[in-house]
Amino acid sequence: MRGVSALALAATMLVGAPVRAETPELVRFAYSRGDFALAQNGRTARIVTAPQDHELVRIAAEGLRADLAAVTGQPASKADMAASGAQVWIGTLGRNPAIDRLVSSGRIDAAKLKGAWESFLIVPLSDPAPGIRQALVIVGSDRRGTAYGAYELSRAIGVSPWHWWADVPPEHHDGLFVAAGTRRFGPPSVQYRGIFINDEDWGLVPWAQGAFPGEPAPGPGTYEKVFDLLLRLRANTLWPAMHKASRAFNADPANAALAERYGVVMGTSHAEPMLRNNVSEWTGRAEDFNYLTHRAAIGEYWRERVRGHAAYETIWTLGLRGIHDSGMIGPNTDEERRRTLEQVFADQRDMLGRAGLAGAPQVFTPYKEVLGIYRAGLKVPDDVTLMWTDDNFGYIRHFPDAPERARAGGNGIYYHLSYLGAPLSYLWLSTTPPALIREEMGRAWDMGARRMWIANAGDIKPAELQIDYFLSLAWDIEGTRAQPIETWVGQWAQDALGNGTGKQAAALLGDYYRLNFARRPEHLQWYLPGEKPHASPLTIAEADERLAGFAAMERRVAALRPLIPPARADAFFELLDYPLSASAAANRRFFAAEAHDALRDADPAESWRRARIAAEAQETLTALTRRYNREVAGGKWRGIMAVEPADGQWRSFRQSLPVVPAAASIPDGDDAGRPAPSPAAPLPLLRPDAFTRAKGWRLIDGLGRNGALLAAGSPSAPARASVTLPAGNWRAVIDLLPAYPSDNGDVLRLTVRIDGAAQTLEIPRRTGDRDWAMAVLDNRIAMPLAPTLGAGRHEVSLEAGDPAVKIEAIRFIPADKTITPT
């Protein structure tokens, strides 16, 4: 679809805060006078499309037809009320003559739909045409808008976007009724919204090999399921899998053709310019991927892809890095790299122009070392989207400034929910709190990053909730972030699990994110790869306190399990039981093994008890993962789940497994009657909710070790609190989120006053050094404060003006104790 470029540019001004549905309830399950009967008395309304409409509209109509059958239990072949004249009309403006006649006659007000990007309305009408008593009209501004409308109705009748990917079956209903009134949706907050399938070696690829035998993994069978999911989540863009374990997306022409049929815009990552998967498709020597010495060969390599995909809706990645996720080969200085990149831009845009794609969407991503080249003065063409990135751990490094916001190409964000790389990877369980996504992506939106959002989603599973939340923000930023995190998660969990369990599930997931925010399950080591191994800084009592939190969470999971409807048992295991139980077992394994080693000489009996706990935790992890891979959903997900580290690859980026004694080597012991370990004595702590907040300060729910953070805005007065310290000498430590300054500087600034004495903190925010590494693994920066404090009451106040300043707590520790990052 070469015409997408003009449409994209024309629609740019029509993308913004979406028009909310005018009526909150779309479908109900009991009839009220005047309702449109979508399903009643064993029959469902006939779904009608126009033959001249887009292929995607037909696909969405077929999906809705299947969804109606799944909810009502009526086979699609019998789901026809043609005799009574009730129909569902699905069509695109200008592509469906019957709907266009309703618009022309004034029966449908489509004024806000014309020229809008990916928008739709749903309206029931009486007597829309001769012989038709009623019609529910779903009309879209473009092909995706129409498809989103069909899938919006699927959501409303109870079909989850995750019905296939998380085995969430719909509840049965005999009656489905749509109330009178027009409901309008769109345009989306962000123009291009999607995911990047990445680091797929240990999950998606082995699963796809078994799920779709006979085709390269991942192939059309996998991608068709991905495309369906994206449309149901109101997304429109995919960066496909690109590791060497995968076959390159464009190596099979069926993949690109399928994406076009589904209306999915294909792009590629920062390491794959011009839609080229270099890992699989560059057949020359790695050292020849050098633009200074092999410009002609690389240029032809790119032109070949442009020729093959000129007819498809594509976002073209510009620029040049190494073969994979590495720096550019050839130039030796940032100045040389700058000049080379500017030549690359000119050559790539010339290729696109010669193919009639001068106006096609183009994006440049200043990722990792490329950000330094950009800041050194790189000139990027004005109509190219600048795709800013996080630091791979959820903290965005650069926000658009005024000149960048004024660019015709706009700005976007590439954000990680999964990552393979330094200092330690996180590829197993998805523990990024939705509140962190909301804060960072919301800040990016506020500062003008509204053209394109892509989330690195790993293998998709088990990041279902994070993907959904990320894309919900991208579709409707204001409506989504206005909801408390627990409310949004509760509704999501209720939709997935049913039986009124959403609120309980949301509370459990809140604990899961809170406990794992202190350390992800993939980051249970307190030294970096290549450093001499050493124990964590937690005492055994402190570790036991952490484990007690996980144990309480496990008990609540067990209490919730019997309340889940049998039909939702697989969904419960995939979305909640496995990640929560596995993270608890991983922590139990690590800290019990560490205590076993620490107590060998001082308390052999307790040491061996801890060894038994570690071995049992390892067995639990093995059993849970075996169940996921072999039993859940009848064995549907064989190969999808791998406990981190999954194998010996990429060892420099992955945690080392704790040394757990073999079960056979652990002597039997009688643990009955042994006294419970003494809990760690609580230390004085100022939590965010202890502060009296002046205008501009706010509490962030659902984030941090204590369940909330204190965030600065543009306060006119300090936030204040008081603390009473017990006898002794104390040092204060303020813990902050390792976010980046809004002005793209290198320093976060915060003034702390204790008893009137001011201390201005200037906190360096560099990326790549050891301080950064420990901060992202800890998810906080611990800053000691002076002077030493004595017993008694102390007054504390905080002053900051950058929304990047987010305070987790002020801790008070004995003056003679070493400050630890825990």
Image (cartoon, rainbow, N blue to C red):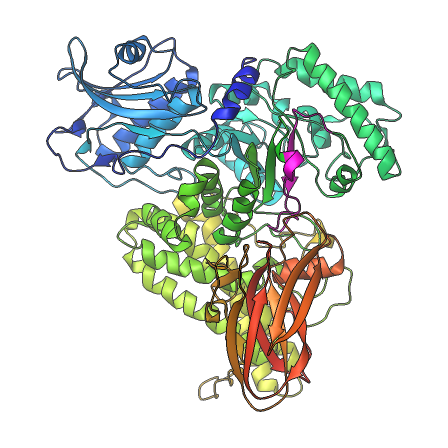
- The correct choice, above or below, for 522 with respect to 787 in the image is above
Q: In the rendered picture of this protein, how many numbered marks are placed on residues?
A: 0
Q: Nearer the viewer, residue 176 or 369?
A: 369
Q: Nearer the viewer, residue 308 or 164?
A: 308
Q: Position of residue 143 (x, y in %)?
A: 43, 19
Q: Position of residue 88 (x, y in %)?
A: 25, 20
Relative side of 19 to 47, left or right: right
Quadrant of the image occupied by residue 147: top left
Relative side of 300 to 409, left or right: right
Residue situated furthest bottom in the rendering:
727
Q: Nearer the viewer, residue 392 or 711?
A: 711
User: Can residue 161 be spotted in the picture?
Assistant: yes
Residue situated furthest left in the rendering:
33
Residue 64: say if magenta. no
- The correct choice, above or below, for 334 with respect to 295 in the image is below
Residue 382: say if magenta. yes
Relative side of 484 to 467, left or right: left
Span highlighted in magenta in the image? 380-404
User: Can residue 822 be spotted in the picture?
Assistant: no
Magenta segment, prevailing SS (helix, strand or loop): loop
Quadrant of the image occupied by residue 202: top right
Say which quadrant the N terminus sits in: top right
x 60%, y 67%: residue: 735
Say which quadrant the C terminus sits in: bottom right
Q: Position of residue 73 (x, y in %)?
A: 22, 33
Relative side of 130 to 732, left or right: left
x 81%, y 35%: residue: 328
x 77%, y 42%: residue: 372
Q: Position of residue 237 (x, y in %)?
A: 53, 30
